[in-house]
Amino acid sequence: MVSTVGLSSHLLAARIEVPRPEALIAAAEAHRLDGIRAMALRAMRNVASHYDASAWLDAYRLALLDTAGFDRLLPSEPRATLLDIGAGTGEVHVELARLFQRSVATETSEGTAKRAREKGIDCRTIDLGRVPWPADERFDVVALLNVIDRTERPITLLERAKRLVAPGGHLVIATPLPLRAHVHRAGGTSDPDEWLGVEGEDFESALGWLVERVLATRGLALVRWARTPYVSSGDARRARYELDDAILVLRPT
């Protein structure tokens, strides 16, 4: 049973349980890197970003929630349109998009966006932390799934994502906690250009800081949240890599 020690009454009241996506986790494990691809990935990271190199080699499968999990997490309406910012190669997006009539994804990496398009996803190559969404439209749900901890400009991205939520809609944010902000670049990682300001050295304290001191102060009210593993394919050392994720459903105020 997951501990709730250290959570405020507000967070306890908003917490829901979601099913663990065992089939997706098994698929991620089955895609683990062999020795040759692992060596190729290490070499390519010296000249390309982690995301480009991983996409070129089809290195990883990711799992967060399956469609049933997202269905339980999200309010039942509105669910007509979805914008998934930073959708990666699309494994998580495919599960979420089944709940919507229309979905659009973005990626900053062209190699990653290409992998997403191969899955039939309408994926645009654009960095919304640097340029605004190019069309005058808004979406019922805007998702930032495991993005704010690894983007150069998380504050700018949050503000732009919030403005893209249609009236009555929701912003959905997933991030590992405690938050360890970093940006992947060729040759390694660096600090982001903007500091999001999330402190706390354990899941509970970091969650409280994120919800109450970062998101609420930017006009984002918590509707509900869940705790779930964020899983990536493993390698010769481990069958999978797993982070402790919070997924937050927020309402712009």
Image (spheres, grey):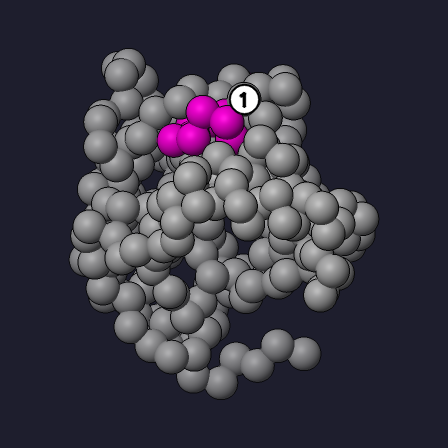
Decide: is 162 above or below 236. above
Q: Residue 185 is drawn in which quadrant? A: top left
Q: Which residues are magenta?
A: 101-113
| Res. 145 in view | no
Instruction: Give SS at disc 1.
Output: helix
Q: Position of residue 95 (x, y in %)?
A: 65, 36
Decide: is 141 above or below 68. above
Decide: is 137 above or below 65. above
Q: Position of residue 96 (x, y in %)?
A: 59, 36
Q: Find disc 1 in the rendering and name its residue.
A: 114
Residue displayed at 48% across by 21% down: 123
Q: Position of residue 228 (x, y in %)?
A: 60, 61
Is 80 colored magenta in this rendering?
no
Count of numbered circles in the view:
1
Quadrant (top left/top right/bottom left/bottom right) for the C terminus: top left
Report whether 74 appears left or right of 204. Answer: right
Residue displayed at 64% across by 35% down: 58
Is 60 in front, or is 76?
Answer: 60
Quadrant (top left/top right/bottom left/bottom right) for the N terminus: bottom right
Q: What is the crowding at mark 1: few (fewer than 14 residues within 10 Å), some, or many (at least 20)?
A: many
| Res. 120 in view | yes
Is 71 in front, or is 133?
Answer: 133
Report whether 227 appears left or right of 134. Answer: right
Residue displayed at 57% across by 26% down: 116
Report whether 224 appears left or right of 120. Answer: left
Is 109 colored magenta in this rendering?
yes
